[in-house]
């Protein structure tokens, strides 16, 4: 059985308070994976699309939709349209609970949609389920 790399968590969140709360909840859920935080969509995309990172994987992306420089839905669309990055699970964490927005994110490939402020139990359950999924499923390189 091949050795699987640990999943790196990429958090795209411009609100420092929300970022700290999300990280606290991740750690409380017993998840100690590397966490890289970006406060803008531009910085997150530059990081994820850099050749070294794009080819490194696996990633779990925690994505805010309301960013100062771009819409998180556009980021989600870019990730899911890329051959390598489309396999990364995406958890949308945002203040918007509009049904059309939620459906649009799921249509684009989001795995989980959670409304902020983050309620610990639902968040930790979603992270644990994704962690279990990532630990037992090996996504093939070529489909």
Image (spheres, helix red, strand yellow):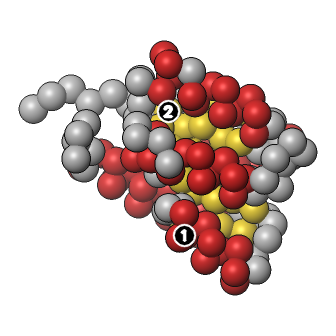
Give the residue displayed 75% in from the left and 39% down from the top.
Answer: 41
Judge whether residue 138 can be spotted in this image.
no
Q: CA distance from mark 2 to mark 1?
A: 22 Å
Q: Position of residue 21 (x, y in %)?
A: 76, 49
Callout 2: helix, strand or loop?
Answer: strand
Which residue is the site of mark 2? 8
View extreme (left): residue: 1
Q: Which of the two residues, 110 or 82, is positioned nearer the viewer here?
A: 82
Q: Which of the two residues, 80 or 30, is positioned nearer the viewer here?
A: 80
Callout in the foreground (2, 1): 1
**Label located before the other in sequence (2 or 1):** 2
Callout 1: helix, strand or loop?
Answer: helix
Which residue is the site of mark 1? 106
Q: Which of the two residues, 101 or 116, is positioned nearer the viewer here?
A: 101
Q: Position of residue 60 (x, y in %)?
A: 50, 44
Q: Which of the two residues, 24 or 35, is positioned nearer the viewer here?
A: 35
Q: Can you say whether 46 is above or below 106 in the image?
A: above
**Residue 121 horizontal side relative to residue 84, left or right:** right
Give the residue displayed 44% in from the left and 47% down from the top.
Answer: 86
């Amino acid at each position: 059985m091949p050795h699987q790399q640990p999943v790196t968590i990429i958090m795209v969140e411009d609100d420092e308070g929300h970022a700290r709360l999300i990280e606290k909840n991740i750690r409380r859920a017993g998840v100690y994976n590397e966490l890289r935080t970006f406060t803008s969509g531009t910085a997150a995309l530059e990081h994820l699309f850099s050749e070294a990172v794009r080819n490194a994987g696996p990633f779990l992306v925690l994505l805010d939709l309301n960013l100062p420089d771009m819409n998180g839905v556009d980021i989600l669309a870019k990730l899911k349209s890329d051959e390598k990055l489309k396999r990364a699970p995406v958890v949308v964490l945002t203040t918007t609970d509009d049904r059309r927005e939620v459906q649009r994110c799921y249509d684009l490939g989001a795995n989980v949609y959670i409304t902020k402020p983050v309620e610990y139990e639902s968040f930790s359950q979603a992270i644990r389920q994704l962690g279990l999924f990532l630990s037992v499923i090996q996504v093939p390189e070529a489909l």
